[in-house]
Structure formats: C-alpha cells, structure tokens
Image (cartoon, rainbow, N blue to C red):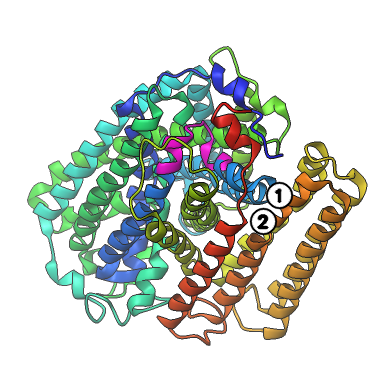
Amino acid sequence: MAEDLGLKADGELRRALDRRHLLFISMGEAIGASWLFAPLYAASYAGGAALLAWLIAGALVLLIAFTNAEVASAIPKSGGLVRYPHYAFGGFVGFITAWAYLLSKVAVPSAGALTATRYLSFFFPQLYNATTGKLTPLGYLVAYLFLALFVYINYVGVAVVGETVYWIGWLKLAVLTLTAAAMIALAFVPSNFTAGGGFVPTGGTAPYTGWAAVFYAIPSAGVAFAYLGFRQAIEYGGEGKDPSRDVPFAVIMAILIAMSMYVLLQVAFIGAIHWNVIGVNEGAWSALRKSISKAPLLQLFESLKYVVPGMVAFITTWLAVIMVGAVLSQAGAGFVSTGGAVRALYGMAANGYLPGRFLELSDTRVPKWSLLMMFLVGALYLLPFPTWQSIVAFSTAARVLSYVVVGGVTAHALRRVAPDLNRPFRLSAMSVLAPAATAAASLIVYWSGFRVVSELSIVVLAGLPIYFGYYAHRRLKAGLGPSFLAGLGEAAAASLAFAYLYAATGGLGRPDDAALWAYVAVTAATAYGSVAIAYGLGAEPLRTELRAGLWLPAYVIVITALSYYGVFGPRGLIPFPWDTVIAVVVTLAFHYWAVLSAFRTKAIDQALGRA
C-alpha cells in the first residue's frame, strides 16, 4: 500500500551538491526566463502597481515554500515534490498531483529555450516573426538545439550542473543588478508609476483594472512563475550532501533574493519607459505588449539612446552585455529545469506511477530514460504553446495546483499521521501556516482566470486512465479491463463535455451557464463513477487510497465553477474582492477535508526504516 519503490535507486544517486549549489539551483530557475519578460507583462497588466504583484506573490510563495521546506527536511528525496503526496495520501491523490506537476515541469525547459531564441532574434531577426509573435522555422530549430544542450549538460552529471549553474548565477545577478542601476541612472521617470489613473491604475491595463489587474498579473504575467523556481533545491534534494539542512535554507533564500531582484528590476523598467519614444500613449499599459514584446528589456534599454544621446556608446555596448547575460541566463535555467523535469519523472516511477525503467541511472548517475523522455515531451510543448506567455500561464496554473496538495496540505497531514518523522526544519504555528499556504496556492490558481483553470481541469482529470490502467492495476491489483475502461470512459466523456463548453462559450470567453453545468455534471459523474467502479473491483489497499483522495476531484471541479462566476470568468457574477474571499473559504474547507483524509502509508515507515 503506497510504498516507495525508489529506495535502491535513491541510494545510487551521486550526492554532490552542497548548500551553495542548492541555493543557486533554486535561483537558477527563479531568476530564469522571467527577468527578461515578466517586468513587461506585469506592467502591461497592472501598471505601476506591478510592484505590488511582485511583493504579494513573493509573500504567498514564501508561505508555500515554508511548508515544503519542512517536508523536504524530513524526507529529502530527488523528485520529492511528486513523492510527498504519495507518502501522505497514497496513489490516487499522489498521481493526480504528480500528473499536474509533470505537465508544468516539462514546459519549463521549453520556455527557457524559447526565451533564449527570442533574445537572440534581437541581433538575428530571422529567428522570430514579429507579426505573428512566434518563432520562424529557423527559430524553432535553434530552440530545439537549446533543448538538446540542456539534455547533454544534465547527462554529464549533477556535479557539472551544480557548478555551472553556480557561476552562471553570479554572472546573471551582476548583469541584472547593473542593468537595473543603469536604467534608473540614465532616464528615470517617477510619474510613470501613476500613469493610467493612479498607482493602482483605473485604465490602460486591459483585460482588468484596479486591484483585479494586480492579482491577475500574478499568475498571468510570469510573476508567480518566477518565484516557483524555488522548488528546484527540493527536486535535487536526494543528491545533496546535507539536504535536511541545506534544502530549507536554499528554497527560502532563493525566494528572498529573487524578490529583491525583481522589485529592483520592475522599478527600473517602469521608470525607464518614455512613451513617445516607444510609440505608446502615456498610460496605455496594455499596448506595451505589442510595442516592445520581442525582447522587452533589450528594446526598452535601446530606446534610451534617443533620450540620452550622449550615452549612445555605453547603451550600445551594454545591449550586447544584456544579450549575452540573457542567453547564458536561459542556458543556466534550462540546465536546472531540465534536471527538475527528469527528477519529476524519476519520482513518479518511484511512486509506481510509471515503469521502473524510469528509475534506471546512467553511468553518470542520472536517470537516463527519464532524461530522454523529458526531451521528447519538452520538444512537443514548443508546438501547441508557441509563445512564452502561453507556456507561462498554463505551466503556472498546473504547477500551483500541485502546490495546493504538496505544500500546506501534505505538511499538515504528515504532522497528523507521522508525528514521529524527524523534522530538522520544523515550522511553528503549523495549524495557521499550513491552511494559509494552501489558500495562497489556490488563489494563484483562481486568479489565472476561467480559461486557464478550465483547461487545466480537463487536462488533469484526463490523466485518470493512466492511474486506473497502470498504477491501480499493477500495484493494487484492480482488474485491468474494467478499471482501465472506467478511467478511459471518464476521460472521453469529460473531454466531450469540455469540447461542448468550449464551443458554447466561444472559446471560453463568453457566458453559457447551461454549458458550464453540463461540463460540471459530466465531469463529476464520470470522475466519481470511475472511482466507484475501481473501488468495487479493488481490495482494501486500493479502497483506502481512493477514500483518501475523494476531496481532490471535487476541489478541481468547484474551483473551475467558481472561476466562471468570479470576476476573472465570463459570467463575472461575483464582484471583486468577494470572489477572492469565497475562494479562500472554499479552499480552507477542502484543506481540512484533505488533512483528515490522510493515512499512514507504507512509504512513511520505509522512510523511517521500519518497513
């Protein structure tokens, strides 16, 4: 029942990462692609109040990180973020969480490859089509070469990744800090922070204005996407020299450093806007997304040569420095995120959700088949999600959905069912901080808007045939035919209902209550119907795991319906901020349901050496 199949492979991993490596591995993604694009998108959505988006998101992610740090200190495992829910709830919750997390993880190397290629296009315009906002065929080829480079560096070994990312990290911090300082020193315009009707703007920030725009920017502009890179130290935890102490330090310090850097850069970015030079009306924040979207930081910095002509030579020279820093930055982030995705696949195999082949290590002690699979799936992500922002929006929502489970819920549940775990990093006030962390993660999902939340719901629940057809059959002895067909029927029926919802709402953009409730009814009936079939087919271990996970499909369905009726959905019936208040109350109810559903798994006893 819910055992850890990765114990042997865990012991063969190379423990080569010290505290500095783990810190810069987390920072390598936290300050990755986002510093090149997120300041633009955050400003375009929230104007001067983009600063608030960074501060609020940083505080929310810190809550999530604190709860993750406690679990990671108690059970340091490579691929830990897909393994910890398995320890507390077994395979049903564990699989859904891991599936959502995997969908987000394999997208991140693609985002890094895309970003590096777009910044190269500043000097090599044949890589990017500014009219369509997508890479050219040659640009795609370059992006795939970047992905191949990420895979190669990871194959060489974790020690090489750690040392490479460490030195690239220092270079990145230097370029970012000096660029922000130069922008502030050259041509800073304080009045920009109140353009558009005030610091929290009342206009110019479509699709939302005021505080709604600030919260929408958190998941949609890449703000949360940036901070969530903190998790990488947890993903590499099983390869740390002293992970129980070093991982909590790395994840918390990475967020604090990233928050400082992003606030500095956002101040510099907003202050450096000279509206007439970039051809945008003052306060028309949303127009920035068309004016300087190709390589935002480079384009804005280049525009300063028309503002301070005497500094043209310096500006031209520093542009080359920014581009080199940008490409190296994405390379470093790509090395880290590729390794993180590989360890997510490895963790799923350790849980029993994927074949044991994904646990096999190469001569360099890296999960070799997981590495190959990551490259293949990551390459596919460049096709349906061809823009950085579209990758970010989906990846952020999918990743944070997993944090609803793997942060506050799992930490709180393990306190209840495994009080005897040694916790070198132990949170005070867990009864307060754990529900707050769950609410923080859920709000980031909710603020993503109905389009992203509904797409995420169908993708997540569509993974159930794999759970029923592979894990429930192989590990818990459910009958293959009926179990798999139940899961397949759920996925097919929910997909058809979603297709109807999509068509009836004009691509999820206009209200149609009947279509929404048809989708909700079909999804709920088929999800719980497939659970009921598997429950009847399985023995007590399977039934225990299913009972422990009844809350999770319900949460996904409820948050989808709420996003439809809130201010970020097409119906917009519940005004802001009451929609956010309701989202918090609903989430807290699911948090306590989840905590009470956890049970003592065999994997916990294995972690304690008692099984």
Residue placed under numbered mark 2 in the picture: 549
Which quadrant: the C terminus? top right
Q: Position of residue 476 (x, y in %)?
A: 79, 41
Q: Label 1: few (<14), some or many (≥20) within 10 Å? A: many
Please report the bounds of the magenta region as a residue range: 70-83
Give the residue at mark 1: 545
Distance from the alpha carbon under mark 1 to that under mark 2: 7 Å
Q: Is residue 221 visible?
A: no
Q: Residue at x 30, y 36 (%)?
A: 325
Which image quadrant for residue 561?
bottom right
Task: Determine which of the numbered discs, if any, sits on residue 352 in the image.
Answer: none
Q: Is residue 353 above or below residue 35?
A: above
Vertical order, 174 against 311 (above or below): above
Residue 48 drawn at (x, y percent): 24, 69
Residue 100: in magenta span: no
User: Which secondary structure lies at badge 1?
Assistant: helix
Q: Is residue 127 above or below residue 592?
A: above
The answer to whether residue 196 is seen in the rendering is yes
